[in-house]
Image: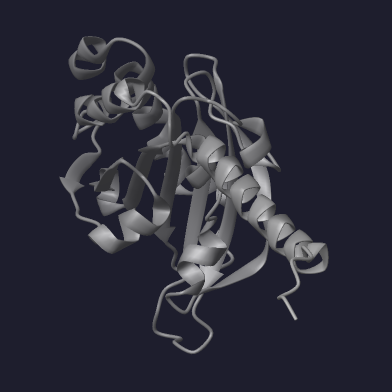
Amino acid sequence: MAPSSTFSWSRTLPLAAGLAVLVAAGLVHGLWSNRWGDNRDLEAAAGRLRAIPLDVAGWKGHEKKIDADRIGRAEAVAYLHRTHVGPGGRAVSVVLLCGRFGPLSVHTPDVCYGGAGYQMLGQPTRHRLRLDDGTTVEFWTARFQKPDDYAAPPLRILWTWSAGKDWLAPSMPRWTFRMEPVLFKLYVAREMATAEEPLETDPCLEFLRAWLPRADDALFGDAEKATAR
């Protein structure tokens, strides 16, 4: 008897459906990460990180490095990491990432710091800070602590995003910044004496009032003005 030539749709349809899902997922990830886009705008934005002054209004900056694997996991194309020491010896840590909107709109601190043994105290809260020039910065903030290491100081972390207009703290950043060609993500953190310290007197806010206008000039405006201020 000759072999049957009957075509088995029952076996082929699930395979075709699975391939369609894989192709669709690849297309979605490619769009969200702008895999096929023009990278010149991203390269120009990344280069502007170097124009942000190291010292600002009494806050002395010190350059820091971030492990290449961590930057790779964040899918950032460039970063700035500094510790700034201000009046009275108060210190804050700054991390500014530059990349595409898809990768940088995720990975909030509860994920990053959770891997280092920290737990978030409560839920993040959204705040607004008015700068001296009248602009308003919106950011999320939360406190973190290591429950198994009482010697480790608690941390306060502020984070926000900007695509070139305002610094925002949306509930759904991946949707808010969809298809933006370049996205910046800013973290400002500080070791606290106690977890009960109020946000209103936190040096992070004083630092942002001094530093952020200079950073904005470098990233979105006149880099020479940022250096000259």
Q: Which quadrant of the figure has residue 41?
A: top left
Q: How is the image coloured?
A: one colour
Tell whether 204 sits left or right of 2. Answer: left
Q: Position of residue 160 (x, y in %)?
A: 53, 39
Q: Nearer the viewer, residue 130 or 106?
A: 106
Residue ID at (54%, 55%): 108
Q: Position of residue 24 (x, y in %)?
A: 64, 46
- Height in image: 94 above or below 48? below
Tell whether 53 sits left or right of 219. Answer: left
Q: Nearer the viewer, residue 177 or 60?
A: 177
Q: Nearer the viewer, residue 1 or 7?
A: 1
Residue ID at (47%, 25%): 181
Tell whether 76 sits left or right of 101. Answer: left
Q: Nearer the viewer, residue 44 or 144?
A: 44
Which corner quadrant holds the C terminus? top left
- Height in image: 43 above or below 61? above
Q: Position of residue 13 (x, y in %)?
A: 78, 60
- Height in image: 56 above or below 94? above
Q: Which quadrant of the figure has residue 127?
A: top right
- Height in image: 106 above or below 109? above
Q: Which quadrant of the figure has residue 215?
A: top left
